[in-house]
Amino acid sequence: MVEQSDRAPLLDWEEIPPSSDPNRAAPSPPAAPKENKDATAGKKTSTPVCLAVTEIGRRNDNFNVTCRPTAAVDGRERSPKGREKLPVHMRGQPVPPSPDLTVRDQWEEKDHIVAVFVVTFNTRSGNMVEWCLPHDINLDGVEFKAMASGSHRITNDFIYFRKGCYFGLACFANMPVDNELERGARMKSVGILSPSYTLLYRYMHFLENQVRLQLKSPGHYSPLEAFYEDKKAILPLTRNGLVTACPTWSVTTINRCMHPEMKITHPAGCMSQFVQFFGEHIMVLWKFALLRKRLLIFSPPPVGVVCYRVYCCCSLANVSLPGIGASVPELRPFFYINVADIPALETEMSYVACTTEKIFEDKKELHDLYIDNQNVKTHRSHLLPLLRLNAADKERYRKLSEQRQMLLYSQEVDGDCTSNEEDLFIVFFMELNNRIFQILSEVAGSADPTLTAEHVRAMGLDPQGDRCFLVELLEVYGVDATLVIDNLCCH
């Protein structure tokens, strides 16, 4: 497979080269999924890092889009059904639909940019959408998502967010100007919308360049117009020929290999920094994520790195065992939110999001875990025991740290470049989750579905300290087993 650059492809709409920003970590290129298909049995086998999961922390065995192997044919990359994967400079161009592909298959093969926009700060009107394509798309509220509250204090930032069934990425910049009308500062954001967030990273450099161009030459939209014409999505039509909405699935509902997906969604080292930032308390985040709770992270701008923490939180809840998690709420990444999202959050049973607005701390009915810097707290009394680190939590973190040190040693001494920290962290938590649910499934299916202290220790949990966590886990996932370990904290 041809290795793809982490830069956005150089097309005619990219008029100025990207400048190197030492303070901005570039996303790492996607790793090629290693997967083989047994022609006779019709079963897939994959390497340990390429695990067949369909959602962040949720599996859907009935979904019909899968992580497909590719084969090189005449120097071109082809899928198992014989579809050519076009060179980078040709992607986004109209391709005749193949008769054996479903609508979702055809959608998956395309770049799906459904909108491009420019947001500006007006000293009289506040945040406003200055320009967009298509002109008739509903961008209500995007002006407050693409330019986070408090952004006037920083020079530049990037923001992931959700708008209805779309995901967005916007790059913000703040430039001082000698202009009394603008009160000494010109602030703009340039962003895009897509049904999935996994491909948004490709256009980070382009958006950074374009926001700088908008600051220096306001109203110069020709590169954005060319970009949209090149990358715009062709939305599936309804029977009457009208486009009513994009497909409501995203990366969280497309059956892809989890690890390559993770690799293209955040810069290298993101998970490592995430674990080091929270330290042992990452085990608290892991429990709340696995229980499908509502996690809200507060942080002042810049927002970009906090958006990556949202994704990392979601990745803690991955389970690759068949049938696990099908009946529980999806742990949905909302990324950046503001007060305009309150009505949407009121109906969500499970999510991870971040905000710069302190008012959310008092909106206790909207979240189960509130994370302010490295401080985690909950207002729900039955979840308070989950905030206390027990011996098993500390042992798990010690093992994780030990594995990381061994990996770093092998990379330095042996020159081992086949593994990295991202592999280690993702697989560590997925194996931990798999072990817990494997034992729960075995106990629930046995003649005596009684969960004992031995079972709990085999899961890597503390029979006493994790009893409240297990009680909640059995209830959330509907596991038909009886927990016999007594602990007053959960009575």
Image (tube, helix red, strand yellow):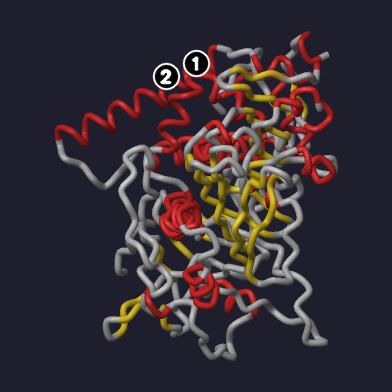
Residue 313 figure quarter: top right
Q: Which of the two residues, 476 or 160, is positioned nearer the viewer here?
A: 160
Q: Position of residue 446 (x, y in %)?
A: 70, 38
Crowding at mark 2 (Cα within 10 Å: few <14, some 14-19, many 20+) = few
Give residue 191's mark. none
| Residue that numbered label 2 is attached to | 398
The quadrant the N terminus occupies is: bottom left
Q: Position of residue 359 (x, y in %)?
A: 76, 26
Residue 268 figure quarter: top left
Instruction: Name the residue: 50% across, 19% down.
Output: 280
Instruction: Name the residue: 64% across, 24% down.
Output: 371
Could you tell whether 270 is left or right of 4 in the image?
A: right
Q: Which of the two residues, 446 or 291, is positioned nearer the viewer here?
A: 291
Residue 444 figure quarter: top right
Task: Name which residue type carries label 2.
Answer: Arg
Instruction: Name the residue: 32% across, 40% down.
Output: 22
Give residue 394's mark. 1
Q: Position of residue 274 (x, y in %)?
A: 47, 31
Q: Circle 2 sits in a helix, a strand or a loop, which is it?
A: helix
Could you tell whether 142 is left or right of 153 in the image?
A: right
Q: Circle 1 sits in a helix, a strand or a loop, which is it?
A: helix
Could you tell whether 420 is left or right of 425 in the image?
A: left
Task: Name which residue type carries label 1.
Answer: Lys
The quadrant the C terminus occupies is: top right
Vertical arrangement, residue 79 with respect to residue 192, above or below: below
